[in-house]
């Protein structure tokens, strides 16, 4: 496990952090939450492991309750990455999307409505597209529209790459399993061959012993 500042590792190997030492999605998520009167940053708990030769990291991000909005309860989500460094980025990005969909009405008229959403089937996504790309909106901005379109394209490309990566990792695991099976089969073949050679040697020894005894009997009879 890589060593990070501001990370506490417990006895079971789980790494706990608010991940604010990074400069990407965790900080962006915290900035967004503060704009809605949150006073405590999200907490991340990650556990790195290796499965069939493939690195894996389970990451849980916990969003606290909002003290200024009593109806906004705490919640959490779980994602999977490769290492801590990429997993809390993935978790924070998903949390931004989840928060935006949970509180679409509150977010839509803020600067955070420019953040693209992954699920294009939701009302939040439709509202966001209309808010940023509709030239009939009174505060329509070409710069904002271009930024939103570019971010959406990057988000889609990122999801495609993640899917391709998941397929590659799955194939790598299958190849590893097949390789281990082949190694096991080869070891069994080697063991069987060794036993076969030992049997042949023993049979030859018994045949020689039988010939010797036969000669002795013939000598005694003669």
Image (spheres, grey):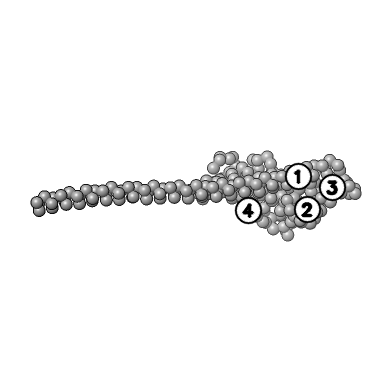
Pick the residue in front: 120 or 181: 181
Q: Nearer the viewer, mark 4 or mark 2?
A: 2
Image spot of residue 129 (x, y percent): 81, 50
- Residue at image coords 69%, 41%: 24
Between the C-alphas of marks 4 and 3, the distance is 32 Å
Q: Which mark is residue 125?
A: 2
Task: Confirm whether residue 39 shows in the render.
Answer: no
Image spot of residue 131 (x, y percent): 84, 50
- Residue at image coords 73%, 51%: 118
Between the C-alphas of marks 1 and 3, the distance is 14 Å
Circle 1 packing at 10 Å, graded few (<14), some (14-19), many (20+), is few
Q: Nearer the viewer, mark 4 or mark 3?
A: 3
Circle 2 packing at 10 Å, graded few (<14), some (14-19), many (20+), is many
- Whether pointer 2 and pointer 1 mark residues with C-beta atoms closer than 8 Å, the reply is no
Image spot of residue 6 (x, y percent): 60, 42
Helix or strand or loop: what does disc 1 sit on?
helix
């Amino acid at each position: 496990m890589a060593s990070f500042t501001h990370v506490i590792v417990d006895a079971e190997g789980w790494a706990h952090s608010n991940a604010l030492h990074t400069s990407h999605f965790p900080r962006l998520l915290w900035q967004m939450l503060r704009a809605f009167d949150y006073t405590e940053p999200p907490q991340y708990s990650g556990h790195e492991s290796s499965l069939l030769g493939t690195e894996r990291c389970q990451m849980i991000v916990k969003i606290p309750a909002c003290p200024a909005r009593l109806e906004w309860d705490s919640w959490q989500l779980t994602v999977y990455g490769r290492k801590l460094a990429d997993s809390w980025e993935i978790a924070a990005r998903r949390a931004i999307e989840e928060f935006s969909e949970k509180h679409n009405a509150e977010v839509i008229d803020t600067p955070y409505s420019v953040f693209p959403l992954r699920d294009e089937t939701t009302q939040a996504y439709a509202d966001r597209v209309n808010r940023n790309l509709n030239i009939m909106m009174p505060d329509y901005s070409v710069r904002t529209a271009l930024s939103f379109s570019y971010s959406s394209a990057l988000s889609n490309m990122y999801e495609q790459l993640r899917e391709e990566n998941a397929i590659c990792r799955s194939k790598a695991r299958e190849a590893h399993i097949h390789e281990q099976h082949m190694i096991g089969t080869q070891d069994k073949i080697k063991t069987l061959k060794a036993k076969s050679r030992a049997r042949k040697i023993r049979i030859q020894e018994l045949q020689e012993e039988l010939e010797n005894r036969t000669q002795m009997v013939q000598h005694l009879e003669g």
